Image (spheres, helix red, strand yellow):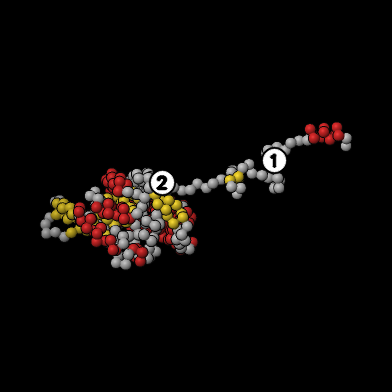
Amino acid sequence: MSPQQKALATRTRRRPSVLEPASAAAAQPLATTDGARPLGERLGVRKTYKLYIGGEFPRTESGRSYEVYGAGGELLANACRATRKDIREAVRAARKAFPGWAARTAFNRGQVLYRIAELLEGRREQFIVEVAAAEGVTRRRAARTVDTAIDRWVWYAGWADKYSQLMGTVNSVAGSYFNFSVPEPTGVVGVIAPEGSSLLGLVSRLAPVIVSGNAAVAIASETRPLPAVTLTEVLATSDVPGGVVNLVTGLRRELVSHLAGHMDVNGLDAFGLDPAAAVAVEELATENVKRVARPPAGGADAVDWLSEAAQSPYLIGQFTETKTVWHPIGS
């Protein structure tokens, strides 16, 4: 080929389209970071774990957070480090939501709790992964834990319109009157979640509180709060009215005393509290004569949450008041 023919062939050769795949040898990234990864490769969206107050997900007013590690020592996420003001906001939201929730029929509250179970079932895989990472258990154990948490919501949903027959009664009186004793919700109840059981322990203490019509302010496990925060995402997309359940995360030494001493909290489930701190918390609770559920002598971590003994209709009665009504017998 003459020099003139070579020049013509070079000018007329087709340039490859940018849409055509290049060969593996010729493929080159547009840019790299530290020579390791192409700039165009997608980065995963890291989840932000916030508080849950009044049906919304605010950050703590202080802007603080703390690191949450898995059972293997790996960093899982940063959780909000709530403050006294966050506790006040949560109690205010619970007090606002309480009248409407208590006024609903027992049958309707049962439907709402069943709806929580439905949505939990739909996100079962996510909860299994989070519980396994938080508690350092096998996948099989984590799956059993999540399944039991789902079933526990269904179990308490079934008791919503039945526990009053167990707790209430018709009393015998010496007169022409009917005398009824009827259980009613206490009001705003603080719930200190068990430290070791990140999901099932919380569900086992929270469900009996709200099924009767109470509103709750819960303090999640300090070291394992992430499954509890994910649970609030389920609550937010279910039929639970905003403010019926409020959840804060943070250091217990900064939160428990403020919840126990709050004058607008009517009851305190301290079952998840360290037994050594129970006396001090009870003293704070006496300021406005709160109902208090004490922690077991061996601590909540000694409880087998998978057992049927961890659920009982009498747990509903811990945070109800008995109203006695007299009614004359007609002719």
- Looking at the image, can residue 300 be seen? yes
| 225, above or below 2, in the image | below
For badge 2, the amino acid type reads Thr
Q: Are marks 2 and 1 in contact (CB under 8 Å)?
A: no
Name which residue type carries label 1.
Answer: Glu
Give the image quarter of residue 317.
bottom left
Q: Earlier in the sequence, mark 2 or mark 1?
A: 1
Q: Where's residue 294, x and y in %? A: 27, 61
Query: Tag 2, which secondary structure?
Result: helix
On-image quarter of the N terminus: top right
Q: Quadrant of residue 285?
A: bottom left
Q: Residue 261 at what x, y percent from top left?
A: 24, 52
The residue lying furthest to the right in this view is: 2
Picture quadrant of residue 155: bottom left
Would you place residue 158 above or below residue 35 in this image? below
Disc 2 packing (10 Å; few <14; some 14–19; many ≥20): few
State the image coordinates of residue 32 (x, y, percent, origin top left): 60, 45
Q: Residue at x 78, y 35 (%)?
A: 13
* Secondary structure state at the residue bearing disc 1: loop
Residue 3 is tagged as none
Q: Residue at x 23, y 55 (%)?
A: 284
Question: What mark, if any, has residue 20 been given in the picture?
Answer: 1
Residue at the image point whose x is 71% and y is 47% from the top: 25
Vertical order, 8 against 240 (above or below): above
Q: Residue reaching furthest front?
A: 34
Res 212 visible: no
**Circle 2 is placed at which residue position?**
237
Q: Residue at x 16, y 51 (%)?
A: 327
Q: Is 159 in front, or is 234?
A: 234
Q: Nearer the viewer, mark 2 or mark 1?
A: 1
Q: CA distance from mark 2 to mark 1?
A: 45 Å
Indicate left or right for 180 with 147 as reference. Answer: left
